[in-house]
Amino acid sequence: MKNTEFAKLVILINSAVPLGMLGYDAVRGQLGVNPIESAVHITGMLALVFLFLSLAVTPLRLLTGKNWLSNFRRMLGLYAFFYGCVHFTTYFVFQRSLSFSGVVEDTVKRSFILLGMTALILMVPLAITSTAASVKRLGAVNWKRLHRLAYVSAICGAIHYYMSVKADVRIPISFIIVLAVLLGYRLIGKRFNFARAKPVRVTSPASQATSSVGR
């Protein structure tokens, strides 16, 4: 992609649009009969959407050979963490009135809250180590191992979403199916060594001629 920085800017701005729309609807009183619950629900779903998008980058890159897609994985992952934090903050401030004991009580009594907390906590080290400096400090192998926690976080988040929905579970099930596809691709691709996108090597005409002679 010729203008990656522009594409990043577009994603950066558009990824913030849902929060702006949520705030606008909240000001206008258009979040339904239970606006706080709606805000918690929407921000949690946004966190999952961006987490899944970040997990989908590598499969899409490998399937399409578009290596420039990797440029957007970090931003999508950070937005997932951001919306996860907004989700927790909305719950903590408006549903638990800044009560830490209330949060602890909920976490102990309700398994879906525990799963949600686990999903968010697992994203903390991923967000902290999302920089290029962290990759160098940890080493590529260790960094990749650490960032596999994103899948664990996604599993916890998807189950949390499913358990928190009391009536229509079609959307949570859709998330679970998508996650199963992403996990399945990772496991099957690793087992059967699916073709991976390889960088194109630029060779000089002289070297191309030399290689042709040897055939």
Image: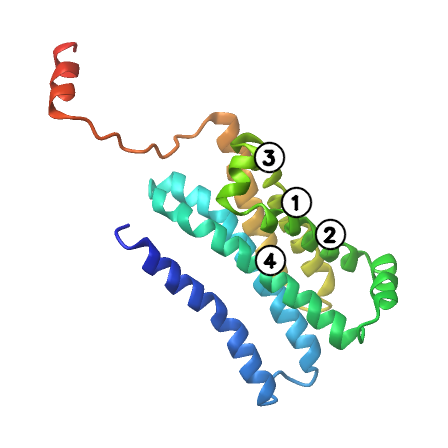
Q: Which residue is under mark 1?
A: 152
User: Which numbered disc covers residue 117?
Assistant: none
Mark 2 or mark 4, whichever is nearer to me: 4
Residue 32 occupies which quadrant of the picture? bottom right
Kind of residue sitting beneath label 3: Arg
**Tag 1: amino acid:** Val
Tell whether 55 sits left or right of 36. Answer: left
Q: Earlier in the sequence, mark 1 or mark 2?
A: 2
Q: Which residue is mark 3?
A: 145
Q: Position of residue 205 (x, y in %)?
A: 11, 25
Which badge, 3 or 2, comes first in the chain's sequence?
A: 2
Q: Residue at x 67, y 71 (%)?
A: 40
At mark 2, the secondary structure is: helix
Judged from the image, the secondary structure of the residue bearing numbered disc 3 is helix
**Coordinates of residue 193 in the picture (x, y in percent):** 46, 26
Task: Give me the C-alpha separation between circle 2 and circle 4.
Answer: 13 Å
Residue at screen point 69% across, 59% down: 162
Which numbered dot is residue 118?
2
Label whose residue precedes the other's in the sequence (3 or 4):
4
Q: 142 or 22, which lies in front? A: 142
Q: Quadrant of residue 7?
A: bottom left
Q: Which residue is mark 4?
A: 81
Decide: few, some or many residues near mark 4? Use Cα within 10 Å; few <14, some 14-19, many ≥20.
Answer: many
Q: Quick one: label 4 or label 1, which is nearer the N terminus?
A: 4
Relative vertical location of residue 172 with respect to residue 150 in this rendering, above or below:
below
